[in-house]
Amino acid sequence: MLGIDTSCDDTGVGVVDDGRVLANEVESQTALHARFGGVVPEQASREHLGVLDAVVERALDRAGVALTDLDAVAATRGPGLVGALLVGLGYGKALAWGLGLPFVPVHHLEGHIAAAVAGSGLAPPFLCLIASGGHTALFAIHAWDAIEQLGRSRDDAAGEAFDKVARLLGLGYPGGPALAALAARGDDRAVALPRPMRRQPGFDFSFSGLKTAVAIALERDPGLAPEDVAASFERTAVEALVDVTRRAAQHTGLAELVVAGGVAANARLRATMEMAGLHATFPPPSLATDNGAMIALAAERRLVDARRRQDEALGADAVPYLPLAATGEPSASA
Ligand code: KG4
Ligand code: ZN
């Protein structure tokens, strides 16, 4: 299975076989967008268009797989920047059609979840926290086709907050990894910041107030040590994520937790989840941020499910008196 992700600013192509990642090539546009402090959508689409063919070739080379060895092709259909999405989606469809293979359109977040559970043997039901640059949400995954959203960010995504605070500290884009590295050297109690949504019922998040609090603190005292600001912000943001997740775990009774999305790469988040007694599964760092392998992994699971349904269909018995709809009353034909 070959998977393509062009939802934002990374051109990701992965090749997987039966849950094993054979190749995962990511061509990052970071340098291109860095000088604007964020992703410029039109630039991102053009860049995907320019490099996708070469990234596909590289992924196949790395996997030691020829185009003719592929059994299916998958691509992200959304959510994301529409121009960027169209490049990977159109490419994936054309490749599948040209090779006479099945094409699997994949939800980007399903890819992040697949990356986190891959190789863990974990299956629904579980609780899932997705924290990326574009999304922050909590889901109860009762089954792969029964996903309940428990809460979401009312404003900025967690990764977006990391990026914005990193920008305030002059760390460049994307800021998450740079901010985390700086935070490791700082005092996480040095700057008092309000914990977002504290004592609020429900499972929603909010991060824009926290970012503003950092901006105000820096304005008031430009002499604050950047590493202390980074550490205090990181602790507060992570505690907010963990606090809501812990309450959701109690509320749903779901014992297993999956943490997915780019912010899942954050070491403090992992440590704090553990300290809170949450049994969490994280993606390996190489699969945490946007990539093509996660799309291929999600697509593989879809195909396996479809085959299982087909097997079940082939086992269907003949039923002479078969109601079309359940009425709650005894069958009229009896
Ligand atoms: O999942 P992802 O690659 O893209 C989206 O689908 O949005 O997530 C990217 C986000 C960025 O905001 C980035 O700053 C953040 O994940 N990120 C981190 C870390 N690594 C990436 N945030 C905190 N700590 C990290 N170590
Ligand atoms: Zn993502």
Image: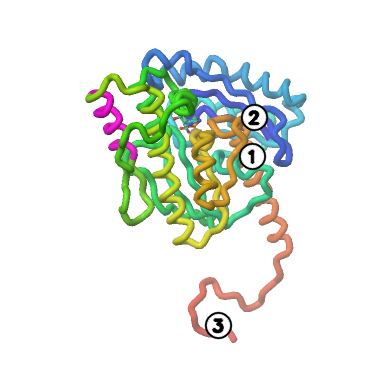
- Mark 2 Cα within 10 Å, few/some/many (few <14, many 20+)? many
Residue at left offset 72%, top offset 57%: 311
C-alpha span from label 1 to label 2:
9 Å
| Contact flag, marks 1 and 2 (Cβ < 8 Å) | yes
- Residue 84 in view (yes/no): no
Residue 150's quadrant in the figure? bottom left
Above/below status of 128 relative to 125? above
* Residue 143 on image: x %, y %: 57, 56
For the residue marked with disc 2, what is the amino acid?
Answer: Gly
Residue 222's quadrant in the figure? top left
Q: Main secondary structure of the magenta part?
A: helix
Residue at left offset 55%, top offset 23%: 11
Please identify, in this view, whether the residue under mark 1 or under mark 3 is nearer the observer: 1
Residue 27's quadrant in the figure? top right
| Contact flag, marks 3 and 2 (Cβ < 8 Å) | no
Q: Which residue is mark 2?
A: 14
- Residue 79 in view (yes/no): yes
C-alpha span from label 1 to label 3:
43 Å
Q: Is residue 173 left or right of residue 113?
A: left
Q: Is 258 covered by the magenta stretch?
A: no
Front residue of 227 and 213: 227
Q: Which residue is mark 3?
A: 331
Earlier in the chain: of badge 1 and badge 2, it is: 2
Q: Which residue is mark 1?
A: 297
Question: Disc 2 on helix, strand or loop?
Answer: strand
* Residue 167 on image: x %, y %: 36, 21
Please state the extent of the stretch shown in magenta in the rendering.
207-219
Q: Is residue 52 left or right of residue 98?
A: left
Residue at left offset 62%, top offset 78%: 321
